[in-house]
Image (spheres, grey):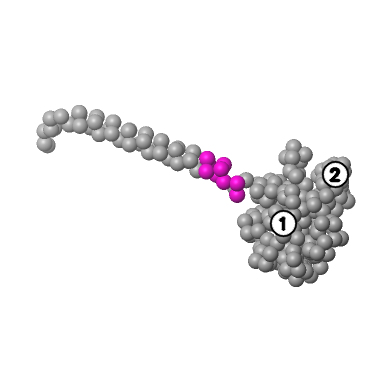
Amino acid sequence: MAPPRPGRPAHDAVEARRRKRSVAISLVLVAGAGSAALVLAGLDPSQEEEDALVYANPAACVAQGLRDAEACRTDHAAAVAAHASSAPRYLTLDECRAHHGPDGCVAGETVAADAAGFFVPVMAAYLLGRTAEQALPPQPLYRHADEGAGGGGGYCTGAGGRVFVAPGASAAHVASRAARAAPSTPRTVTTGGFGATGRAFSSGSRSGGFGGG
């Protein structure tokens, strides 16, 4: 049996301390990476969602009982007012129908006097928050030609965000940037699409730009 080499215990002690430092540094780096990921996720608006409700009319909202009758009617009135003042405007009927379907558009003057000469989408539904505490601005919703045919449940907001709900359902998980980007003035839509950054989620997980219809 070989005799122990001088200084071995001291070497082992140094090696043990080195390993402890390495483990400690690794833990700090991992924790730091996790914190950075959380911070980035918090800054990315596409990661934030709102619990919203979508109804064709106040009666459907009242019947379901998730919001009280006053909120159903008040938010619908606000959405109707927003539709009149900020519905997107198209230069031609064909352009409007390309995005909102063959029965999804009307002459602008039937909605607002200053929309004469344009075509605007029909308000097909309205969006409101699941709770009053959310302070979610009520918004008019418009059918999107790709998703709306056959009751597919696809809508778009006046700002170009997409909102999906399952057929026969009312609850939707909507990206905050779509749910809270309520336009205050109308915009004229030219050939090429109405927005391109809208993102929305249903009970599955669907997303997409608004435009391409």
Is any atom of residue 166 visible in this view? no
Q: Is residue 79 above or below residue 108?
A: above
Quickly name the residue at label 2.
74
Image location of residue 118, percent across then percent down: 79, 63
Question: Residue 143 sits in which quadrant?
Answer: bottom right
2 in magenta? no
Alpha-carbon neighbours of circle 2 within 10 Å: few (<14), some, or many (≥20)? few
Point 77% across, 39% down: residue: 132
Point 36% across, 36% down: residue: 25
Question: Residue 56 sits in which quadrant?
Answer: bottom right
From the viewer's perspective, is 64 left or right of 91? right
From the viewer's perspective, is 159 left or right of 60? left
Quadrant containing the C terminus in the rendered view: bottom right
Point 15% across, 29% down: residue: 7
- Nearest the viewer among 87 and 12 is 87
| Residue segment shown in magenta | 38-46
Which SS does the magenta portion mostly show? helix
Q: CA distance from mark 1 to mark 2?
A: 25 Å
Image location of residue 88, percent across then percent down: 74, 58
Quadrant containing the N terminus in the rendered view: top left
Is any atom of residue 33 visible in this view? yes
Query: How many marks overall?
Result: 2
Q: Are marks 1 and 2 in contact (CB under 8 Å)?
A: no
